[in-house]
Amino acid sequence: MLGYIVGRLAQALAVMLAVALVAFMLFNYVGDPINNMVGQDATTTDRAELREQLGLNDPAPLQFARFLGNAAQGNFGLSYRLKRPVSVLIQERVPATLELVFLSALVALVVGMPLGVYTALRRDSWLSRVILTSSLVGVSLPTFVIGIGLIYLFSVQFDWLPSFGRGQVTHLGWWSTGFLTKSGWAAIIMPAITLSLYQLTLVLRLVRTEMMEVLRTDYVKFARARGLSNRIVHFHHALKNTMMPVITIIGLQVGGLIAFSIVTETVFQWPGMGLLFIQAVGFADIPVMAAYLVLVGAMFVVLNLMVDLAYFVIDPRLRMDRGKAAGKAT
């Protein structure tokens, strides 16, 4: 177990170093940082002094080591566009993105899993066919089309929900939340539904496929032969074993929700990290882009690591395989 954890931590560290290297190259070699920081009236001497102060004349390995040290402390410099520390900008936007992702993942799980179980157990019913046909909307329509459709229906036609913004938020220390206000809930409904539709469809179809596969296994047939009730067979034996791949996919998809919330945040002008990144791209705000890249990469690495460790703890076959491999090695 300890060797497996150490190995996975080493892999995660290697991935983060690769991501940091890409961010460093973006930061230093996409355009000239000096041109982005000084005005057109700056003299050659001023530029040379600023380049020396920033350490841009140092060897590249030394600059990369300095970049890693600053990134580990959350220091990504100043935003070219807003002239504010990037760490402060990220801190202001993180609560909006995480609350949107949390609610979207919750909707996908709470709705997708029961529908997946139902369509697996009642796969020939008309309601299952309707559910599966309707779920094609989640995978066939682009996210921005779904978002615009919801805005047209619930904001333009019915005037029930706001079409943009986060509503009124409550500040709890450095965290700002819209979950404690009515306008905050009204503002997050449509973005959360838009972001969750693809994940909901994925969870539904994955649970259905795995459940149908497990129901055909010998131990489920043996459980039925023992006279166990359908409720125990379905929800104690079948569903429990269905959850293995589902946990893996859901864990990876949470990272995807964070990374790909950009489109949803842009459509609804949701003030999260995705919208900040899009605005940074428009103004070539390299420090913000580099910070976003490192942050999203770190989230993916941490989520993958957590999924791998959870999978290792839950699945006894994985522990047995590694035990056999260790025995052969000795």
Image: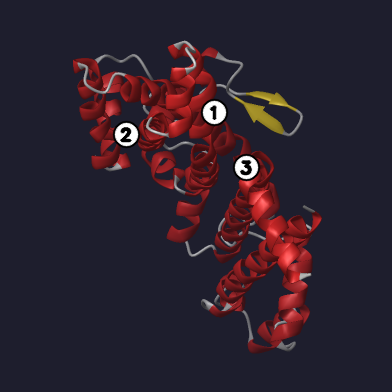
Q: Do callouts 3 and 2 mark residues in contact (Cβ within 8 Å)?
A: no
Mark toward the start of the polypeptide (1 vs 3): 1
Quarter of the view holding residue 117: top left
Quickly name the residue at label 3: 315
Classed neighbour count for the residue bearing mark 1: other residues with Cα under 10 Å, few (<14), some (14–19), many (≥20)? few
SS type, badge 1: helix
Q: Would residue 77 be found to the left or right of residue 149 on screen?
A: right
**Which amino acid, mark 3?**
Asp
Mark toward the start of the polypeptide (2 vs 1): 2
Residue at left offset 41%, top offset 26%: 112
From the viewer's side, name the closer residue of 174 and 72.
72
Color encoding of the figure: secondary structure
SS type, badge 3: loop
**Which amino acid, mark 1?**
Lys
Structural distance between the alpha carbons of marks 1 and 3 = 11 Å
The answer to whether one can see residue 155 in this image is: yes
The answer to whether one can see residue 268 in this image is: no
Q: In the image, is residue 194 above or below residue 19?
A: above
From the viewer's side, name the closer residue of 313 and 213.
213
Residue at left offset 72%, top offset 84%: 61
- Residue 240, numbered label: 1
Classed neighbour count for the residue bearing mark 2: other residues with Cα under 10 Å, few (<14), some (14–19), many (≥20)? many
- Residue 147, numbered label: 2
Mark 3 or 2, which is nearer the eye? 3
SS type, badge 2: helix
Residue 313, percent across and down?
A: 69, 42
- Residue 36, numbered label: none
**Which amino acid, mark 2?**
Gly
Mark toward the start of the polypeptide (3 vs 2): 2
Q: Would residue 205 be found to the left or right of residue 37 on screen?
A: left
Classed neighbour count for the residue bearing mark 3: other residues with Cα under 10 Å, few (<14), some (14–19), many (≥20)? few
Viewport quadrant of the C terminus: bottom right
